[in-house]
Image (cartoon, grey):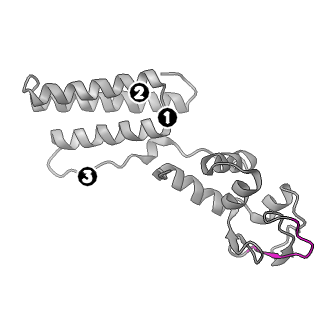
Amino acid sequence: MALTPRLRKRIYRANQAVPMARLMMRLGYRVTGADAEQQFACDLHGKDSKPSARLYPRTNSTYCWACHKSRRPVDLIQEHEHLSLEASVSLLEEMFDLPSIPLVEEYVEIEIQEGPTLDDEIYRAERLLLTLTQERTLTQERTLWAWERFDRVLTLAEREELTPEAAQAVLGSLRERLLDDVRGTQAGHSP
């Protein structure tokens, strides 16, 4: 599974914001909330009769000598709860009340010196559509509608049935409508 930029941000934020000692205590590990290094029994490799792992609060990580693995909060919850990477991050966000990262922030806008061209608008619209499709942000029906509209504009522009300026305007309008849909979805409204 390829990591989207948004999921990467969420993983990084969870690994930074979730205190490993607090997470471990919530998962039932016998550690104190102190900021000191401490040994603990790791159950991820089976029964651990002698503490084989160490908590490193300074780096917000652990290392288990029996597993031969270093773990950050996302790794620990993923292995402990047998979850997917995205589900692990979502669980940590819920457990520690981390605010969601808005999807709209992910889009990289192109700095254009002389004003956008049709190619620039095609790139922006396609990038937005790809991200919305990967993230499943909108309904399937709305996503399909947007792709069909995008393809239709490109086809008409190729056939010269639509001027480059008109195609650019339609794609810009489509992109703005989709961003409004995303904002509405994040605010709790259905597009």
Structural distance between the alpha carbons of marks 2 and 1: 8 Å
Camera-side residue: 170 or 38?
38
Which residue position is annotated with label 1? 136
Residue 50: numbered disc = none
Q: Nearer the viewer, residue 28 or 187?
A: 28
Task: Magenta stretch: give its range.
Answer: 47-57
Q: Position of residue 13 (x, y in %)?
A: 60, 57
Q: Earlier in the sequence, mark 2 or mark 1?
A: 1
Q: Please tell me whether residue 114 belongs to the stretch shown in magenta.
A: no
Provide residue 140's location: percent of width, then percent of height.
46, 25
Q: In screen coordinates, is 82 left or right of 50?
A: left
Q: Say which residue label 2 marks.
A: 143
Looking at the magenta stretch, what is its main secondary structure?
loop
Could you tell whether 15 is left or right of 123 in the image?
Answer: right
Mark 2 and mark 3 lie on one chain; the one further toward the N terminus is: 3
Amino acid, disc 1? Arg
Q: Which residue is under mark 3?
A: 111
3 horizontally vs 164: left or right: right
- In the rendered view, tell whether residue 160 sits above or below residue 114: above
Say what amino acid the circle numbered 2 marks.
Thr
Marks 3, 1: nearer the viewer: 1
Q: Is 40 or 127 nearer to us in this picture?
A: 40
The residue at the point 52 percent across, 55 percent down is: 8
Please say if the residues under marks 2 and 1 sit with CB atoms less than 8 Å apart. Answer: yes
Residue at (61%, 51%) from the top-left corner?
Answer: 85
Number of labelled discs?
Answer: 3
Local crowd size for mark 3, using a 10 Å CA cut-off: few (<14), some (14–19), many (≥20): few
